[in-house]
Image: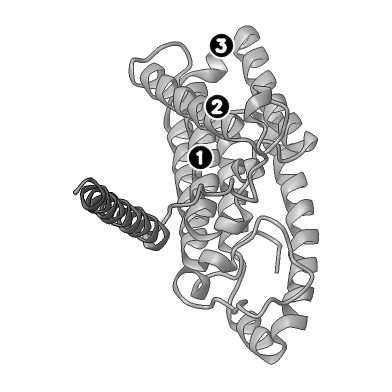
Amino acid sequence: MSNSSHVTEKTEDSRLQDRAKQRITLIRDDDDEAPVRQPQPFPSNVTNHDSEGKLFDGENTPQNIATYGFGLGILAGCSIAFAATGVIYPQMWLFLMCLAIFHFLEYLATALFNGPKLSLDSFLINHSTHYHAAHLAGLTEFLIEAYFFPSWKQFGVINWLGLVLMVSGQAARTIAMFSAKSNFSHHIVSYKASNHVLVTSGIYSIMRHPSYFGFYWWAIGAQVVLMNPICFALFVYWLHRFFSDRIQYEEHTLSRFFREEWDAYKKKTPTLMPFIA
């Protein structure tokens, strides 16, 4: 009796163990079959320096991108507020507002249509030493003339004309970037990718280089807003020289890429920039 009871107990124990094993197996099978969400790798075009906590080191890190964007927002917001309330020299604040919006839109357009090329440099804040020097020279001339000749800096019709040029130039450049989408680049490429196409519709049907046209008149308008006679003359000279050389080189590459298609487009579409054919 005891033996049979022992056997029965063993049998029950075996059944329980078998059931437990089956449950464990089922659980493991379910776990194996369940989709496991793997941690996403850090974007390849962003340098992962979070742990270092560095700022303003020129690296393409999330903290630098966030700081640049935040700084541009603060500059634009404060400039709008100061210009609207009539604080001293509203034209200077209008210029700074347009400057902040310009750099923000450069990054935004790249982020929307050229994700693989997106980086800290897409703000164009780190464009070049010459670019920084040009804006510094404009602000320096404005402040010196405002101090010694305050009557020269009275806000009026000329300032509004300059603002219209800046807004028009910004609109042309932004529309160009949104029209070209992934075909737009801040750098002239020397090879034709498989997805490159010649954009000839929209604003590109009106002018050949709307992004250059936009920045040309934006920069000229900035000196009109500030009413800087010296920098105005210098900007006209240097912008003409810069864009003449750049357009000549870019059109040489476009001619290699698209050949007859480019030649036909070039013949019927102007640049709309003075003395730049």
Split into 4 quadrants, where in the image is the C terminus? bottom right
The residue mark sitting in front, 1 or 2, is 2
Q: Earlier in the sequence, mark 3 or mark 1?
A: 1
Image coordinates of residue 131 in percent, x first then y, are 73, 37
- Residue 67 numbered mark, or none: 2
Image coordinates of residue 26 in percent, x first then y, are 33, 59
Label 2–label 3 contact, CB within 8 A: no
Hey, which quadrant is residue 257 in on the image? bottom right
Q: Residues within 10 Å of mark 1 (few under 14, many from 20)?
A: many
Residue receiving disc 1: 104
Q: Is residue 66 above or below residue 250?
A: above
Residue receiving disc 3: 150
**How is colour applied across the structure in the image?**
one colour
Which residue type carries mark 2?
Thr
Left or right side of 54 for 29: left
Q: Earlier in the sequence, mark 1 or mark 2?
A: 2
